[in-house]
């Protein structure tokens, strides 16, 4: 299970790498054009430029789930074939359309009368569904890419049937989600209602659950309880309406304030810990990913580039990360720091919310921020080193090592012939693919595989993930061996 999650985490690296620059563009855009955040008219070149940058950054931030669809679909496929990405996209379109509010209320009119259920399906196009669609697309590709259909359906054989099967699976998944999704969503709203009266501790529990639920998209359920007027609370809406705590029944801003020290300073501290604990040959890669994500979080509070960069690689560390949010939110509320956001808890929102009547003790962001930076850094560094967690820059070096593998025989035809013989002949091979360094084969009878014979071809190693799969580590010249073997097959 852990290896599967780590593979999922690696497949998210490419789409996550697209996000930091978008967050920075949005932060600059909001700074140049406050009306984009606060409302009002836009005047002058700087306002228009800011609006332009916000829209440019939002193009990917607002459609992050679709990036995950393609990234997971291609990344989880055995040979990273684009067909899996297409199947994943078909799955996403199927699920999000079948579970759109208009569709489900037409099928089940009673949903329209239930505010919580309508809200749940209104939030169906989220990163969790994107990841789910990616997994469906990749799984269907891995399983059915070699499917042979009858002659009259032969056009749809092989890779052409993958998207069709993914669509069928997505219909079944949608049928399950139709009943499960609103139940889970409604349960979280009930949890939110239950912790409203718990003061600073309740705010900390909310912040913990908010971060913990980010991968599933279900944090929207809690956000609507605390930030908006789902149950008559609306911390965000009342704050930006210019009200104070005297106008409401709680300390206004308490459900937003704790995010500021964590997002502005805690994430940069955690990012520095990841850089310091990265392998020496991967520090530049780690810096490129987490440093830009940290800047993005500080400037405008866009945290997904950082969070999705490690949550599946090291889920235990993500749990610790969520706990730190809960702790710092409780402390922040008790100390009386109050600030609000209309986008997220970055420096941009802090500056714009500081003049509002409900803002209080905003100077505390400095000591709170320094404390968050130090605590996040120490805790992350200790956990990463102590438990050897696979954060960015600490992934296994299998691929790099395999790239250095050198065949002892430069006659690719001879190498392919020996490997094929060791596999039990062409009759025992169901399919053949290759990645950067490996031959990936599906076989009929695992008892016919002779590993010693295969290794006599001069390959670097043989792996057998299951009774029907064999992987032969060839090195960077694997494509030439694969081409010769395909001719033989």
Image (cartoon, rainbow, N blue to C red):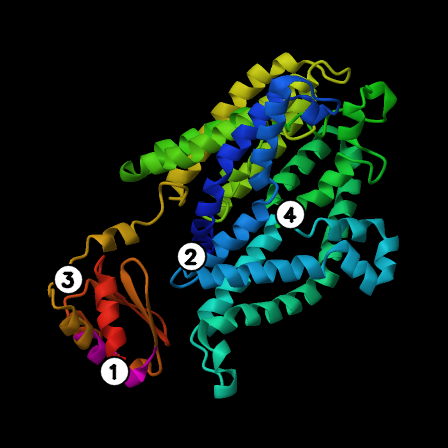
Q: Write down the quadrant of residue 345 in the picture.
A: top right
In the image, is 110 to the left or to the right of 272? right
Q: Position of residue 290 (x, y in %)?
A: 44, 34
Quarter that holds the C terminus: bottom left
> What residue is rendered at 33% in x and 83% in y?
445
Q: Nearer the viewer, mark 2 or mark 1?
A: 1
The earlier-in-sequence mark between 2 and 1 is 2
Query: Is disc 2 placed on a helix, strand or loop?
Result: helix
* Mark 4 neighbour class, 10 Å CA radius: few under 14, some 14 to 19, many 20 or more: many
| Residue on which disc 3 sits | 407
Image: 463 above or below 295: below
| Residue on which disc 2 sits | 3
| Residue on which disc 4 sits | 217
Q: Nearer the viewer, mark 2 or mark 4?
A: 4
| Residue on which disc 1 sits | 424
Q: Write down the quadrant of residue 424 in the picture.
A: bottom left
The earlier-in-sequence mark between 2 and 4 is 2
């Amino acid at each position: 299970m852990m290896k599967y999650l780590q593979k999922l985490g690696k497949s998210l690296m490419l789409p996550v790498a697209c996000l930091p620059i978008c967050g920075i563009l949005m932060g600059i855009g909001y700074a140049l054009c406050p009306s984009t955040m606060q409302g009002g008219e836009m005047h002058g070149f700087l306002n228009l430029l800011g609006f332009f940058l916000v829209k440019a950054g939002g193009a990917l931030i607002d459609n992050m789930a679709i990036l995950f669809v393609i990234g997971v679909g291609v990344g989880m496929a055995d040979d990273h074939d684009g067909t899996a990405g297409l199947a994943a996209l078909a799955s996403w379109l199927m699920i999000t359309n079948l579970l759109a509010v208009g569709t489900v209320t037409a099928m089940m009119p009673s949903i329209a009368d239930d505010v919580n259920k309508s809200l749940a399906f209104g939030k169906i196009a989220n990163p969790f569904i994107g990841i789910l669609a990616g997994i469906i697309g990749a799984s269907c590709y891995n399983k059915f890419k070699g499917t042979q259909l009858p002659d009259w359906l032969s056009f749809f054989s092989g890779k052409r049937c993958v998207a069709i099967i993914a669509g069928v699976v997505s219909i079944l998944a949608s049928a399950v989600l139709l009943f499960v999704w609103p139940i889970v969503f409604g349960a979280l709203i009930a949890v939110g209602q239950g912790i409203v009266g718990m003061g600073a501790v309740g705010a900390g529990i909310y912040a913990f659950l908010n971060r913990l639920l980010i991968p599933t998209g279900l944090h929207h359920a809690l956000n609507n309880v605390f930030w908006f007027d789902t149950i008559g609370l609306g911390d965000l809406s009342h704050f930006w309406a210019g009200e104070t705590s005297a106008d409401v029944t709680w300390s206004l801003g308490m459900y937003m304030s704790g995010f500021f020290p964590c997002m502005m300073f805690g994430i940069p501290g955690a990012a520095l810990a990841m850089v310091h604990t990265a392998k020496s040959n991967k520090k530049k890669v780690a810096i490129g990913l987490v440093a830009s994500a940290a800047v993005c979080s500080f400037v405008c509070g866009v945290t997904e580039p950082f969070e999705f960069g490690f949550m599946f690689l090291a889920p235990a560390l993500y749990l610790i990360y969520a706990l730190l949010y809960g702790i710092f939110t409780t402390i922040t509320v008790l100390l009386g720091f109050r600030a609000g956001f209309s986008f997220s808890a970055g420096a941009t929102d802090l500056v714009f919310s500081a003049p509002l009547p409900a803002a209080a003790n905003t100077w505390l962001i400095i000591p709170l921020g320094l404390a968050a930076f130090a605590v996040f850094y120490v805790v992350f560094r200790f956990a990463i080193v102590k438990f050897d967690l696979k954060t960015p820059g600490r992934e296994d070096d299998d691929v790099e090592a395999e790239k250095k593998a050198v065949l002892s025989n430069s006659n690719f035809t001879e190498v392919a012939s020996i490997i094929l013989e060791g596999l039990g002949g062409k009759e025992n091979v169901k399919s053949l693919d290759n990645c950067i360094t490996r031959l990936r084969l599906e076989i009929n009878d695992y008892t016919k595989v002779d590993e010693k014979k295969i290794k006599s071809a001069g390959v670097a190693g043989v792996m057998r993930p299951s009774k029907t799969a064999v992987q032969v580590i060839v090195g960077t010249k694997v494509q030439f061996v694969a081409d010769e073997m395909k001719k033989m097959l």
